[in-house]
Image (tube, helix red, strand yellow):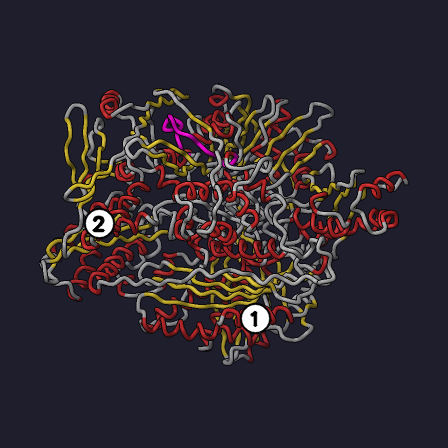
């Protein structure tokens, strides 16, 4: 949520520098990273640091210079080496995150021209990427570690100098920047309730959360005070830090002290550093202050527990009462967000003492993601022993995250003083902690058993560290990822780009910020903004909609609802009704009821909140798969596939296993949120849409139905998407129809840009699944029969829940199970309808089958790898369970090569030795094969078209129906066109996707985009190129031949149309050619878990993938890596949480965590299968966009192996339930031990849970 006071607004709408992207509005993604430069008068130097423009208040930038990505290099002048290297290393796919990555690296180099790898990792820790998997970004930037780089990295950069007044009044807000401390104290006396703001990393995010209606203290403040006052003083007893020193400054001072002083005196500083390294991203640490972190009084903020354990002192001051000292302990905090400071007092400094001899300090935290994430529980612990003994003289233990404020376990500490540091103390401490740490079963934030377990687990870790005075460190060196790319035939011309690792055609423009996305388009004259009004009830009748208050607000133009739709408000989708605006009844929280149209984005947002909707609640209301099963609430059609005789098979097998596995949903989290610009042309009812859509033809169709006009009057333009992953196929069509309705009603252009939280609420994501199975197998691990029932949570409408079909079609994976039955039921619940997501049901369907194989292996006492091999398809000609012929030869090759390249068997032995030697850390390894169908099972989607125009000067223009969203479809189309026409790629230009150029295009999805577009570009050769070849004698490069063709009246324009394969399924008879072909692969991953916290590290991954004969190995490897890392999120990190009322609570990067750089395996090796061929697709290549996601299930099963090792050591069974994602909470609670027993799960029905599992 941006206001006029934010730097990003000035850059985007005033200075018109659109390279700085808006991804989340809360400082959680890094897309808006810019560099700020200020003069440091104390040290007589210029400071360069990164900030999040979406949070940076303009008032704090008086006298500063701001450098954006446009200021360091351009394709029109010269690229900066940072821009050039990320592009050439293939580190830019969709490109939306690239400017932020570039600026983070550029700023690092300004401060440290020869960085280490650790410097680079820290600099990029606050930048998220959803496409690349991070590896190519690191590969590009690590070249700067070479000290031989001898050139000017920093020519004069273009800066944007921002100067502000001392006092600035914005809409409903007064901003005052005091000139000195005296002025600040006077202002606090005059405005005691006004918050003192420096970095805005708490207040800015809290305002966003309040807008999203997520629990937070609402900030009703009129005045904000901005102050810059830096101070760090080393005194005899320790270090005194100015309250407005940034967390980065604090980290630097602690590092300096640790370097320069003896280790014994800096133990506390080392613990503080341990916390600071994981705290937020670099940009946030550059903005956030130590004082703000403390006085925010948020128990999730990690510093307070450590600083309190260190017995720090705060110096506070007011005009009336002068200075006083306050001990930083639990008494400082009176409630969530509240402290004992008086309203007129300000915090001056924090005194951090040195450690004493015989004093030991540790800090602990556990978060959903290891870095750049709020902690679930954090702790600071300090023990002082009597000199020369193990007798406890004093003990401090503080916890954050187990109550509304900081918690000191005072009684526990008091009773342990005077005791010897031994096992009796440990046992008593755990018992006392269990008694003293109180968390109700309905506590805010949920995860109650896990949080209770962490309190004792943290103390146990502290106990062991102190007892042994050791810290185990496992160093895994970064491997040099040199990927053996395919060999290109010597007979192929060096000018022919097909098969070569060509750079993404827009990479340079993306790295410089010149690449244009829909919201970068300059405002059209008279442009308005539309903001959605959504339901706050899950199931209710709409009694009344009253927009009168909203319509009376400044800037509001009109309000839209169902009655304003000129055409059809209701349309049929797969024989199920879909409403644009809810008319009589709402069936989920987040359903669109109306829309406010106003002169500005902020005016529309505020007005939307003022629309009053009166409801009458209806029953039933339920949200989970289990509840839907109880209510028998399912969509039609219900699908089934079956082969063999199930009943007979179950009678003859040695063993029968019945079990289930649950898989949670996933948010797309494309970096660019959904939106568009609708521009009425005024003549003949024509309308132009500049829209972020994967399926522009469907958007065109829905807008036409809604407006009641023909499609030929609606033109959709799609230049590029900032990520999509299936999420911009269907839902964007409804948003486009609403925006178009607003444009038609007002006669003015209208822009729609969803905020991140609204995007996540309205558009939903990947379907949660429940797989229940009954398996018959023999004692040697051979599976003879499997009966699997798949349930998916479809939400309130069917939308794209036909992904269930793909789940069933992939249920066999690479295994020949003679008797196999799968049933698929889509549950109708009162949640926003789930939609397409990369893999389209495949990752869920495959995952259930792999769970079957894993559990059978456990029951048989066999290695899972052996059971997988026993059951694989082996014959040269095999049939799937729906009778489609295929050869598993390349799948088996992938499997064998993967195990060999990974050194699987040797590493398995090493892991067993590691587990024997380590009680509280365990490792696991897992490998899986993959067979993944490419193309649409509904054959009419398997088509593609392209328009090729050759101009008299020899240049070529190509337009096609595909959408560029980072997958490189335009780059591959250029390569194909260059190969066919025998002209260099530089002479070919790809035009935007436009329904006016290529009509009725299929969606860019199902890993089929390149196949369709590439074949369409190739097909045109038969109609156009053949004539030209006759004239040009196979040399089309020169102007004379083209001009000669023109003079001979040869058409220089042609359409290529590819009528793809006939795929179809006969669901009644369980047979049919469902897919064009199959992409094969295999993956092996190794992990290490912390049995005490549930934290896990991804140590190494090896992938061998069959991509046929790759058109562009660099792009294909990028797709493999990006898909795999997205799968890491699906199977281990990304967790959606809903309230009991059906409200999505994880609505932004602060609550919802996607994989960051720290989650990528340090050893990440991707190999393309050599000598692979695919006779079905363009130049024998294969589609690769979707398949790699599933390969990350190896991380899940490796975790399960590690947990099993821990359980075996405790005498527990190897078979145990573990749902996906395998979060830290689930891992920890599965490693059952004496600490988990202290936090038993309450009985259902005896408490009100904080959230529900969907």
Highlighted range, magenta: 55-70
- Image quadrant where residue 202 sits: top left
Q: Mark 1 points at which residue?
A: 897
**Sequence-earlier tag: 1 or 2:** 2
Q: Mark 2 points at which residue?
A: 398
Residue 10: percent from the left, percent from the top? Answer: 47, 27
The front one of 791 and 279 is 279
Can residue 580 be seen in this snapshot? no
Left or right of residue 641: residue 184: left
Label 1: few (<14), some (14–19) or many (≥20) C-alpha neighbours in 10 Å: many
Instruction: Check whether the beta carbons of the residues at disc 1 and disc 2 lie within 8 A of each other.
Output: no
Residue 881: percent from the left, percent from the top? Answer: 64, 67
Residue 1209: percent from the left, percent from the top? Answer: 32, 72
Residue name at image x 40 percent, y 60 percent: 1097
What quarter of the picture does the N terminus occupy? Answer: top left
Q: In this picture, is 904 found above or below 1125?
A: below
**Residue farthest to the right?**
1048
Residue 1199, numbered label: none
Q: What element carries label 2?
A: strand
Give how far apart the Cα atoms at labels 1 and 2 are: 51 Å
Left or right of residue 851: residue 1058: right
Residue name at image x 47 percent, y 39 percent: 154
Inspect the magenta stretch and tell me whether residue 498 lies in it: no
């Amino acid at each position: 949520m941006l206001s006029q006071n934010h730097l990003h607004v000035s850059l985007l709408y005033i200075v018109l520098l659109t390279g700085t992207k808006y991804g989340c509005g809360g400082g959680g993604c890094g897309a808006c990273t810019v560099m700020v430069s200020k003069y440091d008068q104390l040290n007589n130097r210029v400071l360069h640091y990164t900030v999040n423009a979406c949070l940076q208040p303009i008032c704090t930038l008086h006298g500063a210079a701001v450098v954006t990505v446009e200021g360091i290099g351009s394709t029109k002048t010269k690229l900066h080496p940072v821009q050039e290297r990320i592009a050439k290393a293939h580190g830019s796919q969709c490109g939306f995150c690239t400017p932020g990555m570039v600026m983070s690296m550029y700023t690092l180099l300004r401060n440290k021209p020869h960085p280490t790898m650790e410097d680079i990792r820290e600099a990029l820790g606050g930048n998220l990427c959803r496409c690349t998997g991070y590896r190519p970004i690191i590969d590009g930037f690590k070249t700067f570690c070479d000290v031989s780089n001898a050139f000017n990295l920093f020519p004069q950069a273009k800066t944007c100098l921002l100067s502000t007044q001392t006092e600035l009044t914005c809409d409903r807000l007064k901003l005052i920047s005091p000139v000195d401390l005296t002025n600040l104290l006077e202002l606090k006396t005059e405005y005691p309730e006004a918050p003192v703001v420096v970095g805005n990393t708490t207040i800015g995010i809290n305002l966003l959360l309040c807008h999203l209606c997520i629990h937070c203290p609402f900030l009703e403040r009129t005045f904000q005070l901005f102050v810059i006052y830096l101070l760090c003083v080393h005194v005899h007893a320790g270090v005194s830090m100015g309250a407005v020193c940034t967390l980065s400054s604090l980290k630097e001072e602690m590092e300096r002290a640790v370097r320069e002083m003896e280790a014994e005196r800096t133990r506390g500083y080392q613990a503080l550093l341990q916390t600071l390294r994981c705290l937020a991203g670099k940009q946030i640490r550059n903005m956030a202050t130590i004082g703000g972190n403390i006085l925010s009084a948020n128990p999730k903020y990690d510093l307070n527990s450590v600083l309190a354990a260190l017995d720090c002192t705060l110096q506070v001051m007011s005009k009336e009462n002068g200075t006083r000292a306050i001990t930083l302990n639990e008494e400082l905090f009176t409630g969530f967000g509240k402290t004992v400071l008086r309203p007129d007092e300000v915090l001056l400094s924090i005194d951090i003492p040195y450690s004493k001899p015989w004093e030991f300090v540790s800090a602990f935290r556990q978060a959903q993601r290891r870095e750049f994430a709020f902690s679930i529980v954090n702790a600071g612990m300090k023990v002082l022993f009597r000199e020369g003994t193990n007798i406890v003289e004093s003990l401090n233990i503080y916890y954050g995250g187990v109550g509304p404020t900081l918690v000191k376990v005072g009684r526990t500490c008091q009773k342990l003083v005077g005791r010897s540091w031994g096992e009796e103390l440990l046992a008593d401490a755990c018992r006392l902690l269990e008694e003293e740490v109180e968390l109700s079963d309905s506590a805010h934030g949920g995860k109650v058993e896990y949080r209770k377990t962490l309190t004792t687990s943290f103390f146990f870790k502290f106990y062991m560290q102190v007892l042994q005075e050791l810290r185990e460190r496992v160093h895994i060196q970064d491997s040099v990822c040199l990927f053996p790319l395919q060999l290109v035939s010597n007979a192929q011309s060096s000018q022919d780009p097909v098969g070569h690792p060509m750079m993404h055609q827009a990479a340079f423009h993306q790295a410089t910020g010149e690449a244009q996305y829909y919201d970068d388009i300059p405002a059209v004259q008279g442009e308005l903004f539309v903001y959605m009004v959504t339901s706050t009830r899950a199931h209710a009748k709409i009694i009344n909609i009253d927009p009168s208050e909203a319509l009376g607000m400044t800037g509001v133009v009109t309000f839209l609802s169902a009655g304003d739709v000129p055409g059809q408000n209701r349309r049929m989708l797969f024989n199920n009704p879909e409403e644009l605006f809810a008319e009589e009844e709402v069936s989920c929280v987040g359903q669109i009821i109306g829309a406010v149209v106003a002169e500005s984005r902020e005016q529309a947002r505020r007005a939307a909140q003022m629309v009053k909707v009166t409801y009458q609640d209806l029953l039933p209301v339920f949200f989970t798969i289990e509840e839907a099963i109880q209510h028998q609430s399912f969509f039609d059609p219900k699908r089934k596939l079956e082969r063999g005789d199930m009943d007979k098979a179950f009678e003859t097998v040695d063993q029968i296993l019945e079990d289930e596995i649950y898989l949670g949903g996933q948010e797309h989290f494309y970096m660019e949120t959904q939106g568009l610009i609708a521009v009425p042309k005024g003549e003949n009812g024509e309308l132009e849409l500049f829209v972020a859509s994967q399926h522009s033809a469907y958007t065109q169709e829905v807008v036409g139905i809604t407006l009641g006009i023909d499609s030929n009057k609606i033109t959709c333009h799609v230049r590029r998407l900032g990520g999509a992953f299936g999420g911009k196929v269907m839902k964007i069509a409804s948003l486009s129809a609403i925006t178009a309705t607003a444009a038609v009603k007002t006669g003015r252009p209208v822009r729609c840009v969803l905020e991140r939280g609204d995007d996540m609420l309205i558009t939903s994501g990947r379907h949660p699944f429940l797989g229940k199975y009954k398996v018959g197998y023999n004692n040697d691990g051979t599976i003879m029969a499997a009966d699997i029932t798949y349930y998916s949570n479809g939400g309130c409408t069917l939308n794209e829940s036909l992904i269930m079909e793909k789940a069933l079609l992939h249920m066999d994976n690479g295994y020949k199970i003679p008797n196999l039955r799968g049933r698929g039921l889509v549950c109708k619940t009162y949640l926003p309808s789930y939609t397409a997501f990369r893999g389209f049901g495949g990752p869920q369907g495959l995952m259930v089958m792999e769970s079957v194989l894993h559990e059978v292996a456990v029951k048989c006492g066999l290695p899972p790898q052996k059971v997988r091999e026993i059951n694989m398809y082996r014959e040269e000609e095999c049939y799937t369970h729906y009778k489609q012929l295929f050869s598993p030869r390349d799948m088996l090759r992938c499997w064998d090569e993967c195990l060999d390249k990974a050194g699987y068997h040797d590493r398995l032995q090493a892991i067993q030795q590691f587990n024997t030697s380590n009680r509280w850390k365990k490792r696991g390894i897992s490998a899986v094969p993959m067979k993944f169908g490419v193309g649409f099972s509904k054959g009419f989607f398997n088509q593609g078209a392209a328009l090729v125009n050759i101009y008299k000067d020899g240049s070529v223009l190509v337009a096609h129906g595909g959408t560029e969203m980072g997958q490189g479809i335009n780059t591959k189309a250029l390569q194909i066109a260059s190969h066919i026409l025998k002209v260099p790629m530089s002479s070919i230009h790809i035009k935007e996707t436009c329904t006016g150029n290529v009509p009725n295009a299929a969606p860019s999805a199902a890993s089929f985009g390149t196949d369709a577009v590439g074949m369409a570009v190739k097909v045109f050769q038969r109609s156009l190129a053949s004539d030209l070849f006759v004239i040009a004698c196979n040399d089309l490069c020169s102007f004379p031949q083209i001009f000669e063709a023109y003079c001979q009246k040869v058409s220089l324009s042609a359409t290529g149309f590819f009528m793809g394969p006939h795929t179809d399924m006969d669901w009644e008879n369980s047979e049919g050619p469902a897919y064009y072909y199959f992409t094969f692969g295999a993956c092996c991953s190794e992990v290490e878990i912390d049995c005490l916290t549930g934290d896990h590290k991804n140590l190494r991954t090896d992938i061998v993938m069959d991509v046929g004969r790759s058109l562009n190995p660099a792009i294909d490897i990028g797709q493999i890596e990006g898909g795999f890392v997205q799968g890491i999120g699906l199977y281990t990190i990304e967790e959606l949480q809903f309230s009991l009322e059906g409200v999505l609570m994880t609505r932004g990067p602060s609550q919802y965590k996607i994989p960051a750089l720290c989650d990528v395996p340090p050893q990440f090796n991707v190999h393309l299968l050599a000598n692979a061929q695919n006779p079905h697709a363009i130049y024998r290549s294969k589609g690769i966009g979707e398949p790699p996601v599933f390969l990350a299930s190896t991380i899940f099963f490796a975790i399960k192996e590690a947990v099993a090792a821990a359980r075996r050591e405790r005498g527990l069974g190897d078979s145990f339930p573990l749902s996906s994602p395998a979060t830290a909470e689930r891992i920890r609670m599965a490693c059952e031990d004496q600490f988990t027993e202290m936090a038993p799960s309450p009985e259902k029905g005896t408490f009100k849970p904080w959230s529900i599992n969907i």
